[in-house]
């Protein structure tokens, strides 16, 4: 069965620092991979997705993620975090882009 | 373009009472999903519709939860009777599922349910 693990429940960074949020998945074939962001009281917004091709994908708000098949990972990165990036981030996996299975999320806190 | 609309945003009920949540997806989106997000967890799929047909309801607790999308547009999720463990945010999402489809699900802001 497909599953997603986000090992970090809570991460705190200073504004301007770099960020990496970890995501590991379990799936037999090459999955479809997504990162969503959820601000307080808001729905989820898609940051980026990987279906195939270039393993480094660019998303909105300056985020990028790299698919590493050998490590079953799809980590999210941003070179310089802004205070407005404080939110909860969810990694998700899908067999065919149809039904998403979400990880438990990583809450990002940004200090000025 | 209007997003996914959900109501009510907040609802507090006592256990064994009933509650209903409403979702209006983005116009033209064929697929509609209901997810349950318990505090501290990621969203979990409850039910998926394509037009007015159910595609997947394998994780819907059918003894107490029901959902419908009668005309293939808006949808209602009902819980009767509610239990304490039903306290969660209920998220509705939609997807276009045609040639313009990018695989993205568009989420509403959710309906937060508290069961006392």
Image (cartoon, rainbow, N blue to C red):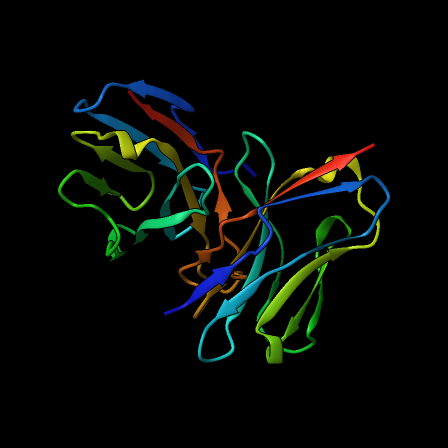
Give the answer, above or below, for where A11 lies relative to A3. Answer: above
Q: Nearer the viewer, residue A63 or B69?
A: A63
Q: To which quarter of the image does residue B53 belong?
A: bottom left
Question: How far across and down, in percent of the image, does residue A61 sit?
Answer: 74, 48
Question: How far across and down, in percent of the image, does residue A19 sit?
Answer: 76, 52
* Number of marks present in the image shown: 0
Seen at 46% across and 47% down, the residue is: B42
Q: Nearer the viewer, residue A7 or A44?
A: A7
Report the quarter where the C terminus of chain A lies.
top right
Give the answer, above or below, for where B27 lies relative to A23. Answer: above
Q: Nearer the viewer, residue A51 or A108?
A: A108
Seen at 26% across and 43% down, the residue is: B69
Q: Nearer the viewer, residue A31 or A28?
A: A28
* Residue furthest right as drawn: A16
- In the rendered image, is residue A85 in sight? yes
In the image: residue B79, left or right of residue B33: left
In the image: residue A107, left or right of residue A1: right
Seen at 38% across and 45% down, the residue is: B35
Question: How far across and down, in percent of the image, does residue B1 sit?
Answer: 57, 39
Question: How far across and down, in percent of the image, does residue A72 sit?
Answer: 57, 73
In the image: residue A32, left or right of residue B115: right
- In the rendered image, is residue B28 in sight? no
Report the quarter where the N terminus of chain A lies.
bottom left
* Residue furthest left as drawn: B63
């Amino acid at each position: 069965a497909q599953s997603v693990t986000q090992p970090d429940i809570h991460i705190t960074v200073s504004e301007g620092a770099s960020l990496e949020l970890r995501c590991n998945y379990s799936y037999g074939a090459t999955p479809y991979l997504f990162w969503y962001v959820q601000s307080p009281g808001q729905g989820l917004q898609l940051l980026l997705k990987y279906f195939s091709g270039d393993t480094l994908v660019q998303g909105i708000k300056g985020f990028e993620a790299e698919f590493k098949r050998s490590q079953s990972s799809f980590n999210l990165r941003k070179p310089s975090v802004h205070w407005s990036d404080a939110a909860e981030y969810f990694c998700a996996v899908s067999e065919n882009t149809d039904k998403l299975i979400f990880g438990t999320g990583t809450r990002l806190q940004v200090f000025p | 373009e209007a997003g996914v609309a959900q109501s009510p945003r907040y609802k507090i009920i006592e256990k064994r009472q009933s509650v209903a949540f409403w979702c209006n997806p983005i116009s033209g989106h064929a697929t509609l999903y209901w997810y349950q997000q318990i505090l501290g967890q990621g969203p979990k799929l409850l039910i998926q519709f394509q037009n007015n047909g159910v595609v997947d309801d394998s994780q819907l607790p059918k003894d107490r939860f029901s959902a419908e999308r009668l005309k293939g547009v808006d949808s209602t999720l009902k819980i009767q009777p509610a239990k304490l463990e039903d306290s969660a945010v209920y998220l509705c999402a939609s997807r276009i599922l045609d040639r313009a489809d990018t695989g993205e699900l568009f989420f509403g802001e959710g309906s937060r349910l508290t069961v006392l």
